[in-house]
Structure formats: C-alpha cells, structure tokens
C-alpha cells in the first residue's frame, strides 16, 4: 500500500528519518508551499523566498534520486491551504491512507498533524545530536538546567575538541577570550553570495507579488538555496571568517552586518547542512592550524551546546512555553521594530539590517533589540512573534527558547540565571553605535540621556521583588540603593516619560 512521505520546508536533508523509513518503490513524497505555513506570522520575504526556493530544488534532487515527488506550489490553486489539507488531497490522488513524517520543529504543526484525519506516524528528527530521551535523562533531577554542563556532556558524546577524556587546550570554554570590542576594520568579505538561478528567480517573483507588503526587503537576495551552495558558503566562512570569529563574536560595528559570523544558521536549520558537518569542518580548521582554539571552541559550543540545548528545552517544556510571561510585561511592541523612526542608533542598525538581510547576529538580537524590549516591558508573546517572523533562521524550536527564555526571561529563569539587561554602557563597550546616536550614552538623566540608561533602572526597580534576592544581581541593587533618593526619582520619572512616549507612538 502506498504511503505519503511528508517533507517540510525545514526538513531538506537527504538522510531525513521519514525518507529512510519509506520505500522509494511504492511511497510518494509530498512537499507543499501552503498558505498556512507561509502566513502564520508575517515572515520576512527573504525567508519565504529562501524556504520555497530550497524546497523546490530539494524536490528536484529527490526526483533525480528516483522518488515520486508531488510538489504543491503556492501559486497553484489546487494546493491545499494547510499541510493537512495537502496531505488529504495527495492521499486521494495516489490512494494513500497513511503518512510518514519526521517530527516537525513546532508544537503548532505537531498538533495539526495529530488532528489530521489521515493517520501520521512521526519519526524522531535524528538530524539533531541529542534525542528527546537523552535530553530528558540529562535534565531529570537537576535543580537548574545550565548550558555549561549540558555542553560538556555533548563534547564527550561527540568527541569534538577532545584529547582523550580531556577538553582540547585544557579548558571546556574560552568565552572570556571572545569578548573583544568592535575592531577598526573588518578583513573578511562576509558570507558567500549566490546570484539567484532560474528556480530562485521564479520564486522571487511570486514572493514579491504575494508577500511584498511584509516587513523586509526582498531585493538583493543572495542566500544559498541548495546543499552544494550551502557547503561552499560554509567553506568560504571557515577559510575567511572563522579565524577571528571567536575574538569578535560579541562586537557590533555600524554598517557591518556580518563581521566574522558564519551566517549559516538558516542553512543548518533548513537541513541543507548538518550540525556535525559544520562542527567537523571547524574542528579540522583548528587541527590544521587554520583557526585558533577560542574560535573553534566558541563556534562548536554554539552548535552542539546552545542549539541542541534550546531544542531540548522547547520540547521538554511543552506547547505552552511561548505563552509564558513570568515578569507580567504587557506593553505593545513599539513601531521601531517594524522600521519606525528612532533616534537610537543601535536599534536603527539592528532593525535596519534585519529588514535588509533577515539577519542580525546574536549580540544584536540579545543585547540590542531583546534588551530594549525587556527593559521597556514589552509583552513577550509579541516579541516572540517578531523574532519568528523576521529572521531567516527562525523556527519555533530554536527561536522561542532564545526569545521567551534567554532574552525575555519570560520562562522565569529556566534558561537564563539572570535577565540579559544592560544600560547603554554595554552597547557602547561592544560597538561604535553610540558615536552616531542622537542620544548620549554617558548621560544618565536629562535631555538626550540614553533610553537604555533610564529604562535599565526602571526595570530593576519594578522587578525588585523578583530579582533582589538573586546573588548575581545584588551588586546592581546595592548601586541603586546607594544612589541619592532624588536622583533615583528623576531616573524613574524620566524612564516613565520614555515609556509614555513609546505608548503614544512617538519617536524614541
Ligand atoms: P554564528 O555566530 O556564526 O554561530 C554559529 C552557529 O551556532 C549558528 O549558525 C547557529 O546554528 C548556532 N547558534 C548560535 N547561538 C545559538 C543559540 N543561542 N541557539 C541556537 N543556535 C545557536 N538562532 C536561530 O537559529 N534561529 C532563531 O530563530 C534564533 N533566534 C534568536 C533570538 C534571540 C533573541 C537570540 C538572542 C538568539 C537567537 N538565535 C537564533 C541564536 C543566534 O542569534 C543565531 O543562531 C545566530 O545569530 C545565527 O547567525 P550565524 O549563523 O552567523 O551564527
Ligand atoms: C517557514 C516555512 C514557510 C514560510 N513555508 C512553508 C511551507 O509553505 N511549507 C512547508 O512545508 N514549510 C514551510 N515553512 C516551514 C514550516 O512552517 C515550519 O516552520 C517548520 O516545519 C517547523 O519546524
Ligand atoms: Fe543605543 Fe544609547 Fe548608544 Fe544610542 S547612546 S546607540 S540608544 S546605547
């Protein structure tokens, strides 16, 4: 009996578990560009174009490998509006009554497949290095689920950067070497760019037509859209970007959108590259003397540590994770996130390159846009939707723990042991943004005071009950308490004015 084999837009991997479980001689692969998936958040047009183009090219590869692939295009009226609707249509077409699928990376879609009238057998997504069972076993009985201990286990399991039982270089973590501030000049030409081929051009036309009003520029599309291109992009970065990746991982420079970052998360998350494959390339570069250990370790920690860890948390915590709001923050996401005018240079830079590239690096996401939303008391659900929409690498399994947990502390501290908040000082230390800003980072109050400086203390003050007892925050509360009462009052009232301006939709 023929079965349908579902391949989703972020499951574009030759060795996908659903494909391995299927029989090429009798089963039929179903792939589809469906309105529900393209529209459940207002995805950045470059993200949609990337997913659709990569899907079309992957479908062609599967056909060339002998699979019968039924591909539904968004511009074909017959295509179902949802994944389930498309499965029902194809089931009828080929006489199939059951579906094989690899577990999707979003609860929303898992639930939709469970509710679909066709029985769907879910295979584990074993492109990840840590299974649900292994993560649950690691988490069981622990008081705190801290990344560092998980990461060490993953180093041992994968053998990456290990010398026998010991970490290479005698240390698990070289993070303290990876915090150099903004350099004068960037000597890496950035991610490899690919001129759109015929498949991508056709997709670009359709996306321009259908999603041209979504936030984000479609022009100048340069992403890799198949595995061969993604492998070239990886090699290009390992050769040119990796050597300084560690040193400047946290730096931010005006107009420099990529610095020495890999810009490969969208390829790994869509399945064009494997996590072990990218780590092996990086480890080899270190072993060959082409990259220093702090760079290789810094990158590998993100991939086998953070990436696997956040996925573990997402599935451990369950479908309600994205609705959490431990700090009870309720403000609407300010228009600056959608490109509204702002005097804040750091926000203009981070949001601006998000608009043009569907990309911002980790510290921009965490310490600029994330930090501002947290300080300003924005509803975490709205922050989450924004991140899910605007980044080319965003799928809920990875985006939600980073936003709800790490960035917004909305999970109450499962991922972060303290909130990632800072005044303008941190941004000034790690970037050159403040030099070109309408505000003054050194001004704590008064005309032109940096909004981060004001909102930082407002945040600390309004969440005092929750954080005063946190030993990692005690020093900041001591600083606040030592301040003159009048000064504290001025800070809080000026912070209130900033918030009132945000609420009134005025430019901040
Ligand atoms: P590099 O700096 O070159 O890092 C190497 C790789 O490590 C990345 O390609 C990525 O695969 C992995 N990685 C690094 N940090 C993380 C992390 N915290 N969680 C998971 N993987 C990580 N990453 C996403 O892939 N999708 C998201 O939707 C996403 N949302 C984020 C939201 C917030 C608020 C924050 C603070 C971080 C988010 N991240 C997300 C993590 C990180 O910012 C991106 O993975 C990274 O910026 C991707 O760019 P890169 O490939 O140049 O990364
Ligand atoms: C992100 C995305 C988009 C924009 N469109 C589709 C689509 O039309 N068809 C599809 O199969 N997948 C798409 N995706 C990815 C999924 O929405 C979903 O986010 C992931 O499969 C969950 O991990
Ligand atoms: Fe951002 Fe404040 Fe610096 Fe301006 S002064 S760039 S608002 S941190």
Image (spheres, rainbow, N blue to C red):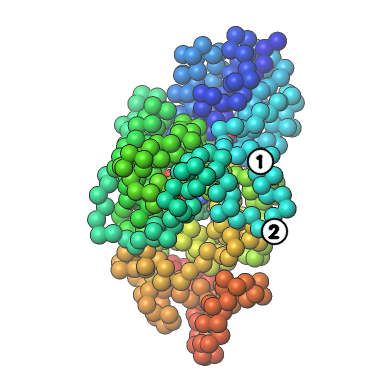
Name which residue lies at 68% across and 49% down: 139
What x and y, as percent, mark residue 26?
63, 10
Judging by the rendered image, the residue that carries numbered circle 2 is 143
Name which residue lies at 41% across and 40% down: 283
What x and y, as percent, mark residue 332?
57, 61
Of 184 and 275, the residue lying toward us: 275
Above or below — where is 464 with respect to 307? below
| Drawn side of residue 276 relative to residue 408, left or right | left
What x and y, as percent, mark residue 421?
51, 67
Question: Where does the N terminus fall, quadrant-wise?
Answer: top right
| Drawn side of residue 111 relative to residue 448, left or right | right
Of 261 and 165, the residue lying toward us: 165
Can you tell me which quadrant of the image ligand 3 is in? bottom left
Helix, strand or loop at label 2? It is: loop
Judging by the rendered image, the residue that carries numbered circle 1 is 134
- Distance from disc 2 to disc 1, alpha carbons, whole Å, reads 17 Å
Above or below — where is 146 with respect to 101? below
Callouts 2 and 1 close, C-beta under 8 Å: no
């Amino acid at each position: 009996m023929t079965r349908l084999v579902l391949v989703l837009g972020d499951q574009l991997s030759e060795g996908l578990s659903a494909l391995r479980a299927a029989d090429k001689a009798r089963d039929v692969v179903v792939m589809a560009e469906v309105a529900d998936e393209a529209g459940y958040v207002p995805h950045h047009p470059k993200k949609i174009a990337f997913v659709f183009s990569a899907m079309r090219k992957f479908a062609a590869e599967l056909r060339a490998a002998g699979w019968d692939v039924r591909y539904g295009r968004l511009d074909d009226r017959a295509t179902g509006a949802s994944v389930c609707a498309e499965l029902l249509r194809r089931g009828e077409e080929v006489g199939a009554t059951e579906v094989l699928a690899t577990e999707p990376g979003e609860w929303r879609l898992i639930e939709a497949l469970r509710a679909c009238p066709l029985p769907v057998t879910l295979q584990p997504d074993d492109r990840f290095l840590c299974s649900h069972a292994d993560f649950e076993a690691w988490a069981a009985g622990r008081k705190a689920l801290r990344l560092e201990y998980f990461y060490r286990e993953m180093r041992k399991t994968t053998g990456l950067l290990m010398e026998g039982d010991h970490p290479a270089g005698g240390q698990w973590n070289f993070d303290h070497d990876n915090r150099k501030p903004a350099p004068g000049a960037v000597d890496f030409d950035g991610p490899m760019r690919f001129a759109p081929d015929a498949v991508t051009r056709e997709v670009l036309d359709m996306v321009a037509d259908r999603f041209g009003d979504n936030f984000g520029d479609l022009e100048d599309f340069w992403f890799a859209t198949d595995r061969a291109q993604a492998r070239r992009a990886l090699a290009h970065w390992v050769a040119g970007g990796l050597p300084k990746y560690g040193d400047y991982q946290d730096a931010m420079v005006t107009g420099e959108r990529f610095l020495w970052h890999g810009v490969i998360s969208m390829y790994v998350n869509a399945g064009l590259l494997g996590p072990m494959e990218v780590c092996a390339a990086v480890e080899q570069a270190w072993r060959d003397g082409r990259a220093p250990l702090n760079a290789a370790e810094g990158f590998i920690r993100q991939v086998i540590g953070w990436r696997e860890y956040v996925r573990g948390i997402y599935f451990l915590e369950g479908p309600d994770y994205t609705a959490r709001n431990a700090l009870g923050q309720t403000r609407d996401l300010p228009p600056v996130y959608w490109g509204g005018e702002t005097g804040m240079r750091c926000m203009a830079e981070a949001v601006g390159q998000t608009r043009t590239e569907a990309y911002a690096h980790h510290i921009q996401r965490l310490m600029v846009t994330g930090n501002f939303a947290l300080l300003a008391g924005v509803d975490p659900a709205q922050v989450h939707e924004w991140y899910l929409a605007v980044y080319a690498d965003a799928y809920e399994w990875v985006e939600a723990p980073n936003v709800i947990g790490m960035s917004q502390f909305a999970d109450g501290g499962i991922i972060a042991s303290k909130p990632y908040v800072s005044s303008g000082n941190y941004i000034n230390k790690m970037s050159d943004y403040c030099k070109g800003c309408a505000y003054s980072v050194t001004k704590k109050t008064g005309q032109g005071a940096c909004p981060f400086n004001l909102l930082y203390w407002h945040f600390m003050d309004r969440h005092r009950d929750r954080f005063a007892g946190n030993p990692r925050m005690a020093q900041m509360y001591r600083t606040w308490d030592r301040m003159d009462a009048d000064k504290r009052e001025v800070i809080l009232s000026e912070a209130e004015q900033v918030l009132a301006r945000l609420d009134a939709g005025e430019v901040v």
